[in-house]
Amino acid sequence: MPTPDRVMRRDEAEALIRRVLEANRVSARNAASVARALVAAEIDGQRGHGFSRVAAYAAQARSGKVSGAACPVAEPGGTARVDIDARDGFAFPAIDLAIEELAARAPETGVAVAAIRRSHHCGQLGAHVERLAERGLAALMVANSPKAMAPWGGSAALFGTNPIAFAAPRAGKPPLVIDLSLSRVARGKVMAAAKAGTPIPEGWALDAGGRPTTDPAAALQGTMVPAGDAKGAALALVVEILAATLTGARHSDEAASFFDAEGPPPGVGQLILAFDTSRVPGAGFGPRLETLLAAILAQECTRLPGESRLQARRALEEGAGLRVPGHLLEEIEALAGA
C-alpha cells in the first residue's frame, strides 16, 4: 500500500531531514543549515528545491561526492570582496557564511561581493537574498549549475539553468523578492515530476534528440528550453561568467550532476552582491522604491513578484501545516537508518 501524505509542522520536517542527513555522514551543524533551506523551499512552493532533494543529498554525502562535514572558509579578496571556499561541501553553510560577511562589509564599503567556489546545489536563490534584504541591504545573486541547456542555436547542453535572484528591503513589509531560472522552468521541477511519476508540460524541455517532450525522464536526459529563447541563453552566459569564471568555480560543462552520487564533487559557484541602501541621495531608497511599486499596483491585474510565496507562508502560520508527499516521505524515512 502506498505511503499516504503526511501533514507536518515546520520543526518536525526540519528534524526529519536533519536526522536523515546526520545518519548519512553529515555533521549536525551542516545538517541543520541544509534542513532549514530545504523546508523553507518546500513552504514557499519551490518543491524542486525541497523534500525531493533529500535522497540525492544523502546519497552524495555517503559516497563523498559532497563533504558532509566541510566547514566553509572566508578568504579576503580585497576591501569589498570576500572569497568563500565551500570545500566541496553543501552550499548552504557557505551561503550562511557569505551572508554574515556581506552584512558586515556592505555598510562600510557601500557595496560588497561574496564569490563562492567549490560549491554545490544552492536551492532557491530568493531565500538567500531575502535574508540580506531583511538586514536593510539590496542584494543580487547568481549561480551556475551542471549543464542542462544548450546555447541558442546549439543542440548540446553547455550551460546550467543558471538562476538569478534579487531582493530589496521594504519598510514595514516583507522584502521584494524576484527569483527566476534562465531556463523556462527550473530543472528541479522536472526532477520532482520524475519522482512523482507525472508528466511535464510541453515547452519545458527537449529530449536527447532535440524533440519536445512531456516525459520528465526523457527531459532529464535532454536539455532545458531557455526562458526568452535567445535572450535567456545570452543571460545564462552572463551568469556563467559571473558565477563560475569570476569566482574560480567549475563551469557548468565541467560540473558533475546534482542528482546522483556518481563522479567528483560538482564544484560550481555562486556570486552574491550586497548594496547599502542608506547611501541613495534625494528622497532615499525606500520612498523611491515604494513609489515605483505603487505605480505597478495602480494598474489592473498586476501584482508584485513573490505574492504566492507570502500566501504559502501565511497559510503555514495559520496552522495549515506542511504536506509531505507519501512517496517522498517513504524515501526519506528509509534513509534515516542508512
Image: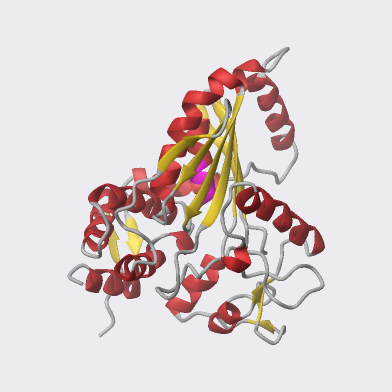
Query: Could one spot residue 168 in this view of the protein?
Result: no
Query: Residue 157 placed where, x, y %?
Result: 67, 73
The relative height of residue 83 versus residue 278 in the rendered view (above or below) is below
Question: Is residue 203 on the magenta stretch?
Answer: no
Which quadrant would the N terminus be assigned to in this image? bottom left
Q: Residue furthest left?
A: 337
Query: Residue 97 placed where, x, y %?
Result: 41, 38
Query: Residue 154 placed where, x, y %?
Result: 78, 74
The relative height of residue 139 versus residue 135 in the rendered view (above or below) is below
Report the colour scheme: secondary structure
Is 205 situated left or right of 100 in this image? right
Nearest the viewer among 114 and 83 is 83
Location of residue 190 (image quadrant):
bottom right
How many marks the image carries: the answer is 0
Is 93 situated left or right of 115 in this image? left
Magenta span dominant secondary structure = helix
Location of residue 261 (image quadrant):
bottom left
Residue under the point 56% across and 78% down: 220
Query: Could one spot residue 216 in this view of the protein?
Result: yes
Residue under the point 70% across and 77% down: 156
Residue under the point 46% across and 62% down: 47
Please provide the residue range marked out in magenta. 124-128
Which quadrant would the C terminus be assigned to in this image? bottom left
Residue under the point 52% across and 25% down: 105
Is 266 situated left or right of 19 in this image? right
Query: Residue 61 placed where, x, y %?
Result: 32, 65
The relative height of residue 130 versus residue 179 in the rendered view (above or below) is above
Q: Residue furthest top?
A: 282
